[in-house]
Amino acid sequence: MAGDDGHLECTYCGRRARSHPPGWCSLDLESDEGVTELHWYRGFCSTEHAAAWLARPLPAPDRVQRAASDWRDWRFYGGLLAAITVCFLATAGMVTISSIL
């Protein structure tokens, strides 16, 4: 995982690197337990360190900031539903008119 100074740091041993050296790997885990989404993102200097970290019980998950829906989302979906309803009613009306004639 990247530190404050931009260097990569191995979660298991603490080794630091400036860029992704050969063998460096990142691990991104997600779990959905009930209504809570759990997320872990870690970097390792080798696959052996990643495997050793995974062999232990998982630590507390990273906090994930979810974007809250706002009124624009509801306005978009409401407009989409209204457009679909209008198209359906127009089609039903045309079918009814054509069957009468």
Image: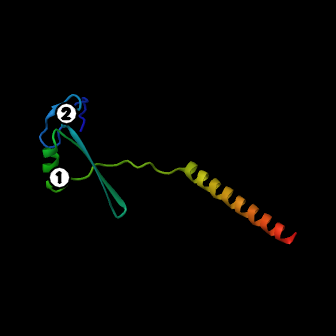
Q: Is residue 1 above or below residue 28?
A: above
Q: Residue at 23% across / 39% down in the picture? A: 1
Q: Which mark is residue 22?
A: 2
Give amino acid for label 2: Pro
Judged left or right of residue 9, residue 82 is: right
x and y percentages locating residue 48 in the rendered image: 13, 45
Q: Is residue 17 above or below residue 73?
A: above
Q: Residue furthest bottom?
A: 100
Q: Which mark is residue 101?
A: none
Q: Of residues 3 and 46, which is closer to you in this image?
A: 46
Q: Which residue is mark 1?
A: 54
Judged left or right of residue 57, residue 28 is: right
Q: Secondary structure at mark 2?
A: loop
Give amino acid for label 1: Leu
Q: Residue at 22% across / 40% down in the picture? A: 25
Q: Of residues 93 and 59, which is closer to you in this image?
A: 93
- N-terminal of the pair, mark 1 or mark 2, is 2
In the rendered view of the protein, which quadrant contains the C terminus? Answer: bottom right
x and y percentages locating residue 30 in the rendered image: 30, 53
x and y percentages locating residue 18 in the rendered image: 21, 28
Judged left or right of residue 101, residue 69 is: left
Q: Secondary structure at mark 1?
A: helix
Q: Which quarter of the picture shows residue 16? A: top left
Judged left or right of residue 61, residue 52 is: left
Q: Which quarter of the picture shows residue 49? A: top left
x and y percentages locating residue 83 in the rendered image: 68, 56
